[in-house]
Amino acid sequence: MTLLSVKNLRVNLRTDAGRLRAVRGVDISVERGQTLCLVGESGCGKSMAALAMLGLLPPSAEWSADEMKLDGVSLLNAGQSTLSNIRGNRVSMIFQEPMTALNPTFTIRDQLCGVYRRHKGGNRAQARERAIYLLERVGISNARNRLDQYPHELSGGLRQRVLIAMALMCEPELIICDEPTTALDVTTQAQILVLLAELREELGMGMIFITHDLGVVSRIGDHINVMYAGRVVESGTRDAVLGCASHPYTQGLLRSVPRPGVNGLQSRLGTIPGTVPSFYQADPLCPFRGRCERKLPICASQAPPVRSGAGHHSALCHNTEISSIAGNSA
Amino acid sequence: MTMSKPLLRAKGLVQSYRVKSGLLSGARELHALKGIDLTINRGEIVGLVGESGCGKSTLARILLGLEQPVSGTVEVDGVPVTQADKRARARRIQPVFQDPYGSLNPSMIIRDIIALPLKVHQICPADERMRRVARLADQVGLPARLLDAVPGELSGGQRQRVAIARALIIEPELLICDEPTSALDVSVQAQILNLLMDLRRDTGVAMLFISHDLAVVEYMTDRMFVMYLGQIVETGPTADVFSAPGHHYTMALQQSVFSPDDDAGLPTTRLKGNPPSPLDPPTGCAFHPRCEAATGTCREISPELVDLRKGGLCACHFPLGVDSGNTPLTRSDPHALRESG
Ligand SMILES: Nc1ncnc2c1ncn2[C@@H]1O[C@H](COP(=O)(O)OP(=O)(O)OP(=O)(O)O)[C@@H](O)[C@H]1O
Ligand SMILES: Nc1ncnc2c1ncn2[C@@H]1O[C@H](COP(=O)(O)OP(=O)(O)OP(=O)(O)O)[C@@H](O)[C@H]1O
Ligand code: SF4
Ligand SMILES: [Mg+2]
Ligand SMILES: [Mg+2]
């Protein structure tokens, strides 16, 4: 059974300038043992979508969804106590900024053991043993001594490892990682990605991985949702979306990334002229039409249809054909 | 006929800072640069890569004259520059920094921000200034209507264009670009990288291009330097460094780069351990605790930067791909080197 299924998720934020429509009808589906990547550029609504699923939106936000099921059980009308039992326990999150996610005034021990005892009970010693086990598992040497350190005493890479350990304390079924490696060096990033992939495998978790880096997506994703201006414009297996990109935005993104072995004297990078549309207007038409080089007259008058092909590959666009190979991965 | 002098030559740059570390230990020396040699030729784009804290920005600030090194010299056109020549240096070397938000005065309009260096250097009369601003805005692809806006009204990519226009307006010979696109989205980054390539082609401006993104460095640069903990560990023509890296750290960096075309899964070989603290640098080769090929020699003796191949230098006792005798060596087999060497 699908681990997480979300249909038509919407998130609005009340701002001084009016209602900002951050997430505009997004579907998300994650299987056990698989990774779904949410990819897209800054501001497209990746974090807001993730926070909505955890009930962690800012107070200025309001959200709705047609369906939100964890393991087949609807969360839409669940009470506060059910939700807080799910959060941090069955579903946990690794945040974009490790410093804001760790409390600077508590030691590593307090933070790790705190979540465990809140959800699993158990005594101090059990919590401590699990903390040490996980710190070692995420590659922190000297775990016993690290327990009494404070977050600011650790390097960025170590902090991110502590956050991963913390997210795993209660053996979650689903882990949501919001750009967990964006602030790290490439060599540290590679270590953390390998670690997350191993842990996902080992624990059979489902994973949602948020990133703007298409290279990272290609290494860690089973399934990809490409987001643009609050909507999923293309979705499919990794091979389908990266190998046979069908939406003009996905194609543009892929052309703009410098590739290994290519020098600027030989070829120019593709660009996507223009900027994202306003977030304040409700707009059923294609959000990409102002920047699209394949735009048709119909794009300015009718909402784009969902075009689908083999292996759940789909794109929201008037002018595309899904030509993807039948999904051979996942 | 003599060989033309490099535009910029840095020799033996050393920098250290006094930092407080911990409660009991008093102030300690942090060695940020440990003897950096670097040249940049006219019209050349030179890359500088290395992990966070290895000293890239420190080097940039010294080249710009924003801070003084403990020792070492910087020559422009073969002439040593000193603190006294600050203004002259600024005319020839201009910065483009990472943060397009912080580096522009929020209360000034764009037109005045771009024109400011002309005013400071008293280069031309006011009416000519405005003509130059308009021309440059056009060159960097900044819509003319934005010239009367303030930075807060511009997107990240537009602000970076302003920073580039401001740097170029006095027609410098060298741009020091410190992570100029790290804060930008990939589609915006592509526009800025194309712009920098065009500017080099059209104006011949040279660049030091600092980035931690290897794919970007490969795309942008002619020659590159790899830094690790305050030292240059490898340098050479970019194409050579990528096709046959000599240093094990360069190799590790390369294996950590992911392209959207890969479906290789996650890397199987990856760098072990964490970056060392500059306050407590390892003995011998600074990379040895993380290096698969490290031997006792590496723990004790710091390797010199020596010829690896034509035009390439590498600081490693057991460089990759180097035949140490009659045993042929492959890049993936550094241990064979150790045994035969
Ligand atoms: N607290 C807030 N109040 C008002 N608007 C917000 C708030 N947080 C985010 N937004 C806006 O909501 C939209 C979606 O933001 P979100 O953080 O989900 O983007 P993102 O895709 O995660 O971007 P990034 O890659 O930069 O993290 C953006 O337009 C953003 O400006
Ligand atoms: N003013 C200063 N006082 C004390 N230490 C400093 C100072 N400036 C830099 N450092 C230290 O010197 C070392 C080199 O820093 P630098 O900013 O040059 O690194 P970098 O390679 O640019 O890193 P990044 O990729 O994170 O920008 C770091 O350990 C840093 O903490
Ligand atoms: S619907 Fe039209 S405007 Fe939108 S991406 Fe497709 S072709 Fe372009
Ligand atoms: Mg985000
Ligand atoms: Mg820096």
Image (cartoon, coloured by chain):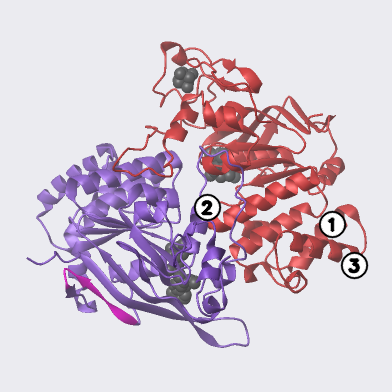
Chain colours: A red, B purple
Q: Is mark 2 within 8 Å of ligand 2?
A: no
Depth order, front residue of B133/A158: A158
**Where residue A283 sits: x, y (%)?**
53, 22
Q: Chain of mark 3?
A: A
Q: Which residue is mark 1?
A: A116
Is the CB atom of the residue marked by disc 3 within 8 angstroms of ligand 4's nearest atom? no
Q: Which residue is mark 3?
A: A125
The residue segment tinted magenta is: B71-78
Q: In what element is the residue under mark 1?
A: helix
Task: Tell me the SS state at disc 3.
Answer: helix
Eye-nearest disc, 3 or 2: 2
Check whether the beta carbons of the residues at disc 1 and disc 2 lie within 8 A of each other.
Answer: no
Same-subunit check for callouts 3 and 2: no
- Under mark 2, the amino acid is Gln
**Do discs 3 and 1 belong to a common subunit?**
yes
Label 1 marks a residue whose chain is A
Q: Quadrant of ligand 1?
A: top right
Mark 3 nearby-residue class (10 Å; few <14, some 14–19, many ≥20): few
On the same chain: label 1 and label 2? no
Q: Report the amino acid beneath label 1.
A: Tyr
* Distance of label 1 from label 2 (alpha carbons): 36 Å
Residue receiving disc 2: B255
Q: Main secondary structure of the magenta part?
A: strand
Q: Give the secondary structure at mark 2.
A: helix
Q: CA distance from mark 3 to mark 1?
A: 11 Å
The answer to whether residue A72 is above or below residue B298 is above
Q: Residues within 10 Å of mark 2 (few under 14, many from 20)?
A: some
Q: Nearer the viewer, residue B60 or B161?
A: B60
Query: Chain letter of disc 2?
Result: B
Residue at (27, 39) in percent of width and height: B141
